[in-house]
Image: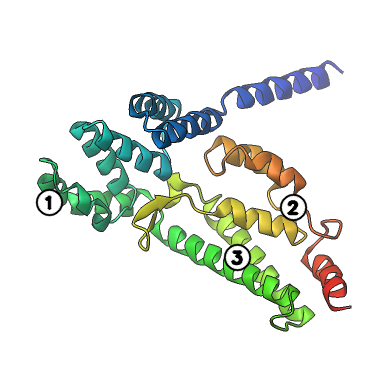
Amino acid sequence: MKKYILLFTIMIIATKSYAQNCNYEEYFTLYDIAKKNYSEKNYKEAEKNIKLAFKKIEFPLGSGLQLGLLIAQKQNDSKWSEQISINLAKGGVPLRFFRYLKKYDWYEKFESDFETYSKYYAENFKPELKEKLKDLIKRDIQYNSKYHDWRTKKIELTLEELIDGASKILTDFNELNSIYGFPYEKITGYNYVESTNTIENFKTDVLIIHIYQRGVLILEDKIEEVICNGGMHPNRRENLKLMRGFGSSTGIEEEMKIRYEKHRK
């Protein structure tokens, strides 16, 4: 009996300790405040809050670093701009992103050292995982768009096509998690979007939401861990509690059969 009481006590302590060390929750809170400060042109407060955010964690996310870079320019802080740029370059952001920083004295050396930063990225991150994740997210968005076109009768799909498309996305995401672990930015590097010349969060949270809606509560027992390690904004916690399909979340096939009956009856 004493053994079970001791084990239960250890589990409670470990849970509390984990909850108390959810540093990315604090990071996101400060990041959101800094983003609001920046939009209101309160650059001094924005700088204070984003720097506090960076102190909360060991690995700042790409969107936070991009915000920091924008704030540094507004504050005419050349040194801080350089430091952030080096961090981004080491995280896999290509040289084209930094072209607008040529006005700084440090840029010429930064450009000449860029090969070193690229080598660091290749040796310390998983570029192949980033490409696989980006491809999977793109295919998920395409499937979701196709599903809505089917739902509104713009196109026709068979039940098998609905099941197979959703199942392929789930299988591929499970495979990524099995091989690499959850695709955090500290593993993939940063998500540079060429069309907008910006650094954005991967839409992994949207991918998970779609999978929930398709009948599978993937990683349900690990969502807190994902949030606390920077893989998802804390506001998704409540979103995921509400996201369900039409069925009882017992699988894609059951969910798609219900949807097929609902929209093609």
Q: Give the distance between the C-alpha atoms of the residues marked 3 and 1, in whole angstroms.
A: 39 Å
Farthest residue toward the front?
40
Q: Horizontal and vertical percent for residue 221? A: 71, 42
User: What residue sits right under mark 1 in the picture?
Assistant: 112
If you read the primary sequence from the N terminus, does the residue marked by circle 3 or circle 1 appear first?
A: 1
**104 horizontally vs 67: left or right:** left
Q: Horizontal and vertical percent for residue 4? A: 82, 22
Q: Quadrant of the C terminus?
A: bottom right
Residue at image coords 43%, 52%: 188
Q: Give the distance between the C-alpha atoms of the residues marked 2 and 1, in whole angstroms.
A: 48 Å
- Disc 2 is placed on an element classified as loop
Q: Horizontal and vertical percent for residue 149? A: 68, 75
User: What residue sits right under mark 3 in the picture?
Assistant: 172
Please state the total of marks drawn on the protein image.
Answer: 3
Q: Name which residue type carries label 3.
A: Asp
**Mark 3 or mark 2: which is in front?**
2
Observer-nearest residue: 37 or 168? 37
User: What residue sits right under mark 2 in the picture?
Assistant: 217
